[in-house]
């Protein structure tokens, strides 16, 4: 993947897009409504001309952030939402209808899994497959299949989907390929490069990066031809068909459902995004060092991390992610060490849910974020009761490795 100019582009994005008084940051626009001197101009904006009307449909501040994410993804356009889940919910509820079929990876974020329960109640058929193998996706396709959904690296099991082959399959069959790029971020993978139609990034994670703002985006890569897609309302069949899908997601997801990103959160995320490349490198380096240390540790039974040769999709991850393997890992301790005892002995690591923060966070996944889904679904996702999810931060490496080591040793000595 060509990363030349990645950071320079982000740093100068606001200024080059639309300078306001020479400001290098897009200002935080707090206006709810936007006034016009000419009523005809107001009407024109309602009828599709670029501009702002009511902040539920976005502000110049959210638009500037959308522009940054579009540049990171090298896509055509993006729409921002209050959270990553709002972005995902907007896509599924606006592009799928009762009777449509969705094929999803069985290795997915718990809240997405829960959202799928709601979709099923609304009449959408969903088949879960092991998406590390594109053949399984292919075998699940039906005449009414509209969309395929996968996470690049799955939260929390770290399975790496067969992203390239699934992209080719979706292109051949004319299916919407929705990629959740949250764990990789556009610095490790661009949806484009695996022929995704739409890319979701939770901005709350690496892109914002500092645990101080929530947000999400949907980016249109421009690869999908919406002219043959049956679920686009007549009023959104305007202009080139590559834009229809995102227009409907924006109108329905923002205007009608109101999952809008606030301007001050957009600002904080935009500032965070400036150091994405720097942070991501350190996140990945720390994670690889920690994974190697833990895999060799007598207190640890198993480490799930795509950067380790023992990971089933290590070779694929090495090829796709350009030598970086992300910063999320799963750890299972040896029998006899209680995962709660271990976690309680950590001093640097914070016991908290969330990932992609600058600080290292850990939690017992089966007992917390994956508690509600039940044992059967957890087993399908490869999450044992003792599975500890670790989101590796950017602390000094020796402090981080030292913290895990001291906690493990204390447990082994008792
Ligand atoms: C966190 C996360 C989401 C949801 O993002 P929010 O911004 O927290 O709503 C979706 N997918 C994955 C893989 C995530 O890790």
Image (cartoon, helix red, strand yellow):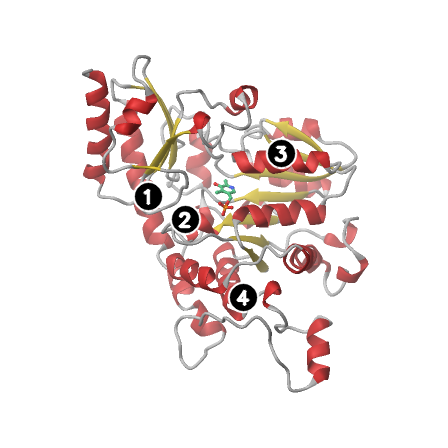
Indicate the secondary structure of the residue bearing disc 2: helix
Which tag, 4 or 2, sits closer to the chain's start?
4
Say whether mark 2 is within 8 Å of ligand 1. no
Q: Quadrant of residue 113?
A: top right
Image position of 102 with respect to 71: above or below: above
Q: Which residue is mark 2?
A: 206
Q: Is mark 1 within 8 Å of ligand 1?
A: no
In the rendered view, would you say 134 is above or below 30?
A: above
Q: Earlier in the sequence, mark 2 or mark 3?
A: 3
**Cβ–Cβ under 8 Å for marks 1 and 2:** yes
Residue placed farthest to the top in the image? 336
N-terminal of the pair, mark 3 or mark 4, is 4
Nearer the observer: mark 1 or 4; the answer is 4
Q: Disc 1 versus disc 3: distance between alpha carbons? A: 28 Å
Secondary structure state at the residue bearing disc 3: strand
Q: Earlier in the sequence, mark 1 or mark 3?
A: 3
Q: Secondary structure at mark 1?
A: helix
Residue 165 image position (x, y, % from top left): 59, 36
Q: Earlier in the sequence, mark 1 or mark 4?
A: 4
Question: From what the image shows, is residue 373 above or below residue 213?
Answer: above
> How far is disc 1 from disc 4 in space, using C-alphas?
28 Å
Mark 3 — residue?
Answer: 104
Residue occupied by mark 4: 63
For the residue carrying disc 1, how many other residues have a C-alpha within 10 Å: few (<14), some (14-19), or many (20+)?
many
Mark 1 and mark 2 lie on one chain; the one further toward the N terminus is: 2
The reply to whether the C-beta atoms of the residues labelled 3 and 4 are less than 8 Å apart is no
Crowding at label 2, few (<14), some or many (≥20) Cα neighbours within 10 Å? many
Identify residue for label 1. 283
- Marking on residue 381: none
In which image quadrant can residue 15 be found? bottom left
């Amino acid at each position: 993947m060509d990363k030349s100019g990645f950071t320079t582009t982000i740093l100068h994005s606001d200024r080059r897009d639309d300078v306001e008084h020479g400001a290098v940051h897009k200002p935080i626009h707090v206006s709810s409504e936007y006034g016009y001197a000419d009523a005809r101009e107001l009407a024109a904006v309602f009828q599709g001309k670029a501009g702002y009307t009511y902040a539920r449909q976005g502000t110049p501040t959210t638009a500037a952030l959308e522009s940054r994410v579009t540049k990171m993804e090298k896509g055509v356009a993006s729409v921002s939402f209050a959270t990553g889940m709002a972005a995902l919910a907007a896509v599924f509820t606006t592009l799928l209808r009762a009777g449509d079929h969705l094929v999803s990876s069985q290795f997915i974020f718990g809240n997405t899994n829960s959202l799928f329960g709601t979709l099923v109640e609304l009449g959408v058929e969903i088949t879960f497959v092991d998406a590390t193998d594109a053949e399984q996706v292919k075998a699940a396709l039906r005449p009414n299949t509209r969309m395929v959904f996968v996470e690049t690296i799955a939260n929390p099991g770290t399975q790496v989907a067969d992203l390239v082959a699934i992209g080719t399959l979706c292109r051949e069959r004319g299916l919407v390929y929705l990629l959740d790029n949250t764990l990789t971020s556009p610095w490790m993978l661009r949806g484009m490069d695996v022929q995704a139609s739409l890319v979701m990034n939770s901005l709350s994670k690496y892109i914002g990066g500092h645990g101080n703002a929530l947000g999400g985006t949907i980016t249109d890569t421009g690869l999908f031809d919406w002219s043959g897609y049956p679920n686009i309302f007549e009023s959104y069949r305007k202009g080139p068909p590559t834009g229809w899908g995102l227009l409907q997601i924006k109108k329905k997801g923002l205007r009608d459902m109101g999952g809008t990103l606030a301007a001050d959160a957009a600002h904080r995320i935009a500032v965070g995004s400036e150091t994405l490349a720097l942070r991501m490198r350190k996140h990945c380096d720390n994670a690889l060092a920690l994974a190697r240390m833990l895999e060799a540790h007598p207190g640890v039974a198993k480490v799930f991390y795509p950067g380790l040769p023992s990971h089933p999709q290590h070779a694929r991850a090495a090829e796709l992610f350009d030598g970086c393997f992300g910063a999320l890992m799963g750890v299972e301790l040896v029998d006899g060490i209680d995962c709660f005892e271990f976690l309680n002995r950590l001093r640097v690591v914070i016991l908290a849910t969330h990932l992609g923060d600058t600080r290292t966070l850990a939690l017992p996944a089966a007992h917390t974020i994956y508690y509600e889904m039940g044992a059967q679904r957890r087993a399908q996702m490869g999450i044992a009761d003792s599975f500890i999810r670790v989101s590796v931060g950017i602390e000094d490496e020796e402090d981080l490795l030292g913290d895990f080591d001291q906690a493990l040793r204390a447990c082994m000595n008792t």
